[in-house]
Image: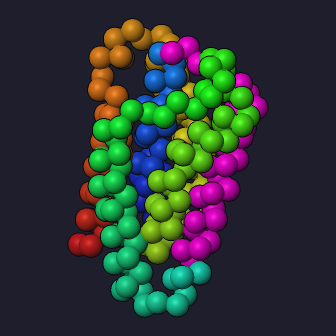
Amino acid sequence: MFINTLILAISSSLDAMGIGITYGLRKIKFSIFSRIVFFIVSFTATTLSILLGNIIKEFVSPNFTTFLGAALIIGIGIYAIFESSNNPKDFDFDNSNDINNKEALCLSLSVTMDSLCIGFGGSMLGINNYLFPLFVATLHLTFLLIGDILGKNLVNISKLPNNIWGIMSGTLLIIIGICKFL
């Protein structure tokens, strides 16, 4: 259960790396407060999705919850792959090259959308309800910051396709979902 929880958290957080790289290449900064906002929103949203999944799980059969959870994770994986063809949204609304608290709130809500569905579906598959939100919030923030550092310091990183992290994330989710069907 621990490994499944960690793998789902990693797969739902990989797109934050791509966003971090994009912002790092553009020299956009994340203040400590914007990082805190990012962490809190990721944690709270993921926790709420797990709670909702657990409530629904009480009213349907275990076989159906396993099927629904796996189907949701596969669906999010497919969506992540198709969505990765779009350019990352620019959340530096005031063009200050600094992500303020409001911009961090919008950015974290955008990045957390996948985690909402993954948390909902994962709760039906039996992920660790306590560790998953903590893993997701920590990994979102970590991958965002690693991407930011890579983008700022490695000139060659810009040669990677912009959508690589979304494709990797989506593929990993599809594999996890298929394994749950087996």
Q: Residue at horizontal 48%, vertical 34%?
A: 89
| Residue at 51% over, 53% down | 113
The C terminus: image quadrant? bottom left
- Where is residue 173, by image quadrant? bottom left
Residue at 71% x, 29% y is 100
Q: Position of residue 133 (x, y in %)?
A: 60, 56
**Do we see residue 61 in this rendering?**
yes
Does the magenta segment cover residue 47? yes
From the viewer's side, name the closer residue of 89 and 166.
Answer: 89
Question: Above or below — where is 64 with respect to 43?
Answer: below
In the rendered image, the vertical position of residue 150 relative to residue 129, given as above or below: above
Work out which residue is located at the far front of the displayed protein and give it.
94
Q: Which colour assignment does the render follow? A: rainbow
**Quick check: is 44 in the magenta stretch?**
yes
Q: Is residue 114 above or below residue 119?
A: above
- Tell me if 54 is positioned left or right of 150 in this view: right
Question: Up-down: is 132 above or below 140?
Answer: below
Q: Residue 104 location, x and y as percent?
A: 66, 36
Picture mark count: 0
Q: Position of residue 106 (x, y in %)?
A: 63, 42
Quadrant where the N terminus sits is bottom left
Residue 29 visible, this angle:
no
| Magenta span | 26-54
Q: Examine the residues drawn in magenta and state their main secondary structure.
A: helix
Looking at the image, which is closer to me, 86 or 134? 86
